[in-house]
Amino acid sequence: MTPSTQSSRLADIFAEVLRRNPGEAEFHQAAREVFDSLERVLERHPQYADASVLERICEPERQIIFRVPWVDDAGRVQINRGFRVEFNSALGPYKGGLRFHPSVYLGTIKFLGFEQVFKNALTGMPIGGGKGGSDFDPKGRSDGEVMRFCQSFMTELYRHIGEYTDVPAGDIGVGGREIGYLFGQYKRITNRYESGVLTGKGVGWGGALVRTEATGYGAVFFAEEMLKTRGESFEGKRVLVSGSGNVALYAIQKVQQLGGTVVACSDSNGVAYDEAGLDFELLRRVKEDDRGRLADYVEQRGGSAEYRAGAKIWSAAEAGRVDVALPCATQNELDGDDARALVAAGVLAVAEGANMPSTPDAVRVLTEAGVLFGPGKAANAGGVATSALEMQQNASRDSWSFPHTEERLREIMQGIHENCARTAEEYGEPGDYVLGANISGFTRVADAMLALGVI
Ligand code: NDP
Ligand code: 2IT
């Protein structure tokens, strides 16, 4: 087939994705980005088009939507909506997190599930892709309310998951506390201590060391590999990290361990600036132990720290040099104007700790300016990869040390970086990590799908 045949075929398939999934803007955006990388793949490998692999990849294998009723502390009945999208199991059981956030709707979960398919393939591990969640807002809820919500959520979800079927984990709004309540209810309903059914468990009861740190650490390891290609490192670098949740926290810690200074982080209310560098241990305590807000951190830190309510973190680029930016909060949080501000501030590298945090416009601005750009499905794959290591430890009833597991994570991130770089080069676009990640992830899933037949 000629290139033009392929472009028109891709355009037709994409038009069908739009038609079949109306109103799901984030899913459209995630699909479009992958489609934009695939023209030359379909030219070189007509077998994928012949077997309609792309059409099949865009259609989730199963989508589950359910009612989650629960009783709040005031005795009122609350109703939320639960989701699990089991996207692709060609490489292994569906694997991917659960997001609890009021903005969640089916389109959110589908975009995240779609990204997860390629991300999980990139890790080289035996995991398929899925995602789930709810429009439940855990903010301001008591532990008892969160527990009752999680129990109700699992009372429906349990029938769809299992260590060989579908293995959820955390994402926004779902951390160790929620995984504990979810696991407890699964265990109670099934009467099985099936450790491998969820990852992100507490280290005392089946969890793996380094899983908590893995996504943030992994994103920094990926950025470090990108910097190495220009003879650079984190030593002495000024860094911005958006968010202040699980991914952001441990990205901040690893940057500091590698000699960089993180001068700002954020939450949905504002930005904390700290020219002297954020105090990781204080920030961790405020966020994890006290479940506090960034404003509380700034109040306790005093001195050089400053809190700007309503500010956007990327505007910090206007105030001085920025060497590395790590968006670790949420989708579409870094737009074209933000990217232009970062370029003007001299940014060398951007690695996405979050899923799809950069808008298509931002990606274009950064890559056209020659900024090293690590897309989320490569740069944040350390979290799910360490989840797969947790599954491995559960299956063998073993537990590994922190240094050993961190070393495995570092090797995995180096492997993903090398794979993306090599694939981009093979396809004539050296340094294009977006192309490299999409093609490499796609071909691994597509080859497995071809081998398994039309199912
Ligand atoms: P957390 O819930 O721990 O933290 C989320 C952070 O992002 C908080 O600081 C939150 O601020 C901020 N945030 C969330 N939504 C918005 C919004 N709409 N606008 C502005 N800020 C927002 O989640 P994680 O750290 O786990 O997840 C962060 C990102 O990383 C997500 O994109 C997630 O999909 C991705 N990711 C997570 C992995 C993991 O292992 N946890 C693995 C790979 C990717 P606030 O507290 O004010 O809401
Ligand atoms: O987006 C992600 O990769 C995650 N939220 C982690 C998924 C997992 O199964 O560990």
Image (cartoon, grey):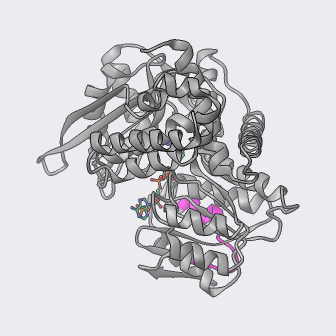
Q: The C terminus is located in which quarter?
A: top left
Residue extending furthest toward the bottom: 319
Question: On the picture, is 108 further left or further right than 220?
Answer: left
Location of residue 63 by image quarter: top left
Residue 198's place in the image compared with 295, above or below, is above
What residue sits 57% from the left and 33% below the top?
A: 1
Residue 258, given in percent of the width and then of the height, sits at 79, 59
Residue 410's place in the image compared with 87, above or below, is below
The range drawn in magenta is 273-285
Question: On the picture, is 410 further left or further right than 314?
Answer: right
Q: Give whichever of 300, 234 is nearer the camera.
A: 234
Count of numbered marks: 0
Q: Give whichever of 419, 306 is nearer the camera.
A: 419
Q: Give whichever of 45, 236 is nearer the camera.
A: 45
Magenta-span inclusion, residue 49: no
Residue 369's place in the image compared with 61, above or below, is below
Question: On the picture, is 22 further left or further right than 229?
Answer: left
Residue 121, given in percent of the width and then of the height, sits at 60, 31
